[in-house]
Amino acid sequence: MTHCIPKKLFLLCLLTFIGCGFHLRGNIDLPANVKNILLDIQGRDNILEQRLEYLLKLKHIKVYNTSPENINLYTLRIHSHSFNEQVLAYSQSNLPERIRIIISIPIEIINMEGKVIIATTATTSSQISITPNNPVIQNQEKNIAKDDLRKKAANQIINIFAKSMNKKNIKGNKGNKGNKGNKGNKGNKDNERNKLNEN
């Protein structure tokens, strides 16, 4: 039994590493006009903070941790997160041996005027097998899974932010097209009036 423990930890670490690459593929591009962001994380979490900064910088976004002077920018506010566990299976000795770990992270997206435009919760989960009779190894297995969940949740948060920015961008473009169309119609009406006056 003890020989299986290092193998389980190795496989869990390997799955965590591989999973990071796959999750990056699903990311959504941000509009070109979004170049700066204030990242406001309530409560310290180095893994989550580093992952968010890494993903934003991959998209060529400059990340601020405090409000800069004379720059209006969107704020991505991350509230303190929580983990919940659900037991899925028990061992012969009636101890948990398979569990689901769930992470929940409340977030807010705040526009340049200080208004909250999105308030939602990023949630993701993972099922893992744990070592029932060894609390030390069990905690290590859980911590590895929790670190992976933080990274998955960070990807989800960036996608939520990107979707909200793209929706805003689409609305803005539709408004501009409508204005251009109205200007064109006004020009046509003026030409028709001039022709009538000439006749």
Image (cartoon, grey):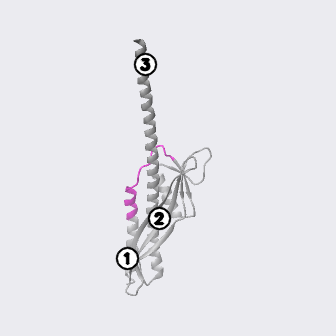
Q: Residue at x 43, y 43 (%)?
A: 170
Q: Who comes first in sequence, dot 3 or dot 1?
A: 1
Which is more foreground, mark 2 or mark 3? 3
Residue 183 image point, x, y percent: 45, 29
Please rate how many residues cluster around mark 3, counting C-alpha atoms within 10 Å: few if below 14, some from 14 to 19, many from 20: few
The C terminus - image quarter: top left
Q: Mark 1 falls on what kind of element?
A: helix
CA gap between label 2 and label 1 equals 23 Å
Q: Which residue is mark 2?
A: 150
In the picture, residue 130 is in which quadrant?
bottom left
Mark 1: which amino acid?
Lys
Label 1 sits on residue: 7
Q: Are marks 2 and 1 in contact (CB under 8 Å)?
A: no
Q: Which secondary structure lies at badge 2? A: helix
Q: Is residue 46 above or below residue 56?
A: below
* Label 3 – label 1 distance at C-alpha: 84 Å
Q: Secondary structure at mark 3?
A: helix
Residue 114 drawn at (x, y percent): 58, 49
Residue denoted by label 3: 193
